[in-house]
Amino acid sequence: MAQGKAVTADMQASVVAERPAGTGDRRRQRGEASIQRIIDAAIDLIADEGLSSLTMQAIAKQARASNALVVFHFGNKENLLRAVLQYLSDQYDALWTSMVRAPDLSAVQRVTGAVECGRRFARQHPKWVSVFVIFGSDRKSMQIYKEIGLPGDLAYNAEASDLLAEIVRLGDYTGVDPRTLAESLNYIVQGAWYWGHLNPPDRESEIPAKTIATLLHHAFPRHFASA
């Protein structure tokens, strides 16, 4: 028996040694592609049909995958929903970072980037925004949003408030509350997302951008042009 085990071990070592370089990488890449395909399928279904009728079987069908594969990657629907929201949050954070945190930007450019970030995200990825809205509107999924999405939203709002406070100092402005202004801008962006989800033709409306431009010009007339 000991000899048999030794032979088996030698055979396994030989297989590993003969395995082409990069086999493990290709397997990992296939796994990652499979996970992303399932997440994309879930996003499409949530955006189009909501959460109430969402099932692992429906997601598997949309992803052209087996139920077993979906369960293998995510275990259950809650884990999959968490993965969806984490993916979308990461995508928004990447856009925010590129538009607000890029080096050598002035405070005015960063504020402009923060405002434009929400609009660009909505125009480029309307289904992603719909999923965000649905997560924040459904009682069961709201807890997941509070754990994954809300901390980022609060951090963005605080960052915008700090940038507005910097402009107050730079321009020696008085009578401007950066926190209140930041929250007001956030309400406009969030409201535009919600309204665009309910009434898709209005996703291209310039009214939110003009409203934000008016508020910024009123608060900082020497730094922001009027709408």
Image: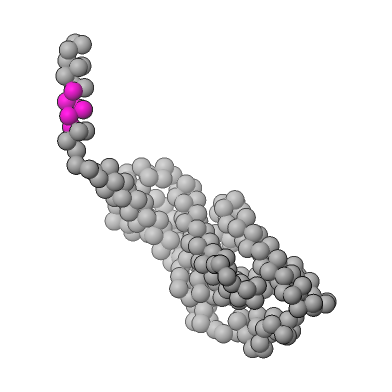
Residue pictured at 66% horizontal, 64% vertical: 159
Q: Position of residue 85 (x, y in %)?
A: 50, 56
Q: Position of residue 16 (x, y in %)?
A: 21, 33
| Residue, far front | 104
Q: Position of residue 55 (x, y in %)?
A: 41, 52
Q: Position of residue 195 (x, y in %)?
A: 57, 75
Number of callouts in the render? 0
The secondary structure that dominates the magenta segment is helix
Residue pictured at 83% horizontal, 77% vertical: 174
Q: How is the image coloured?
A: one colour
Write down the quadrant of residue 138 in the picture: bottom right
Examine the rendering and report whether any part of residue 66 can be seen: no
Q: Nearer the viewer, residue 117 or 80?
A: 117
Residue 42 is left or right of residue 208, and the answer is left
Residue 173 inside the magenta-drawn segment = no
Residue pictured at 20% horizontal, 33% vertical: 17
Residue 13 inside the magenta-drawn segment = yes
As drawn, 184 above or below 51: below
Write down the quadrant of residue 169 in the picture: bottom right
On-image quarter of the C terminus: bottom right
Residue 169 is left or right of residue 48, and the answer is right
| Residue, far right | 175
Examine the rendering and report whether any part of residue 149 can be seen: yes
Residue pictured at 45% horizontal, 73% vertical: 124
**Magenta residues?**
10-15
On-image quarter of the N terminus: top left
Residue 201 is left or right of residue 21, and the answer is right
Write down the quadrant of residue 151 in the picture: bottom right
Q: Nearer the viewer, residue 172 or 14?
A: 172
Residue 83 is left or right of residue 181, and the answer is left
